[in-house]
Amino acid sequence: MNNMLKYGLLTCVLISVFSLYVTQGFSLYGHWTDKILFWIWIGATIKILIQYQTKMVKIYKWFLFVCLILLCIPFFSPIVTLISFSFGLERSFEKKNR
């Protein structure tokens, strides 16, 4: 079987297991099964991104990168607030003091 077909099948299984867990509370049998499936998917993703350089893989690479950045945005907000407050960049107090 082709590596891309195996990866697509693994991705579909992972998505279906995740959706069953979120909607119905069902999980695969055993504690490590979900974790092993996820780590195999991560390893296969890295292998696919490095080994194949087709147009679809490049689009998928950018899609994963954009999703990663969008997931990090909520965590940057407290850091930016802390930095702006600690360096005196907070401007909300200037109007009240004048």
Image (tube, helix red, strand yellow):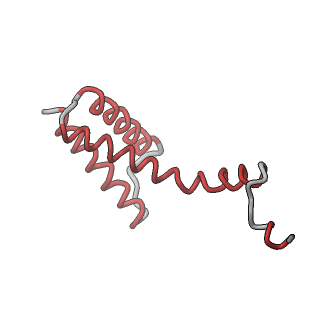
Q: Is the residue 62 above or below the residue 92 in the image?
A: above
Q: Where's residue 22, x and y in %?
A: 42, 62
Q: Residue at x 22, y 44 (%)?
A: 8
> In the shown orientation, is residue 56 left or right of residue 43?
left
Q: Residue at x 36, y 45 (%)?
A: 64
Q: Where's residue 26, x and y in %?
A: 40, 60
Tell me the quadrant of the picture where the N terminus can be found.
top left
* Outermost residue toward the left in this view: 1
Q: Residue at x 76, y 55 (%)?
A: 85
Q: Residue 30's quadrant in the figure?
A: top left
> In the shown orientation, is residue 16 left or right of residue 95?
left
* Outermost residue toward the front in this view: 98
Q: Residue 21's quadrant in the figure?
A: bottom left
Q: Residue at x 44, y 42 (%)?
A: 35
Residue closer to the observer: 3 or 74: 74
* Outermost residue toward the top in this view: 51
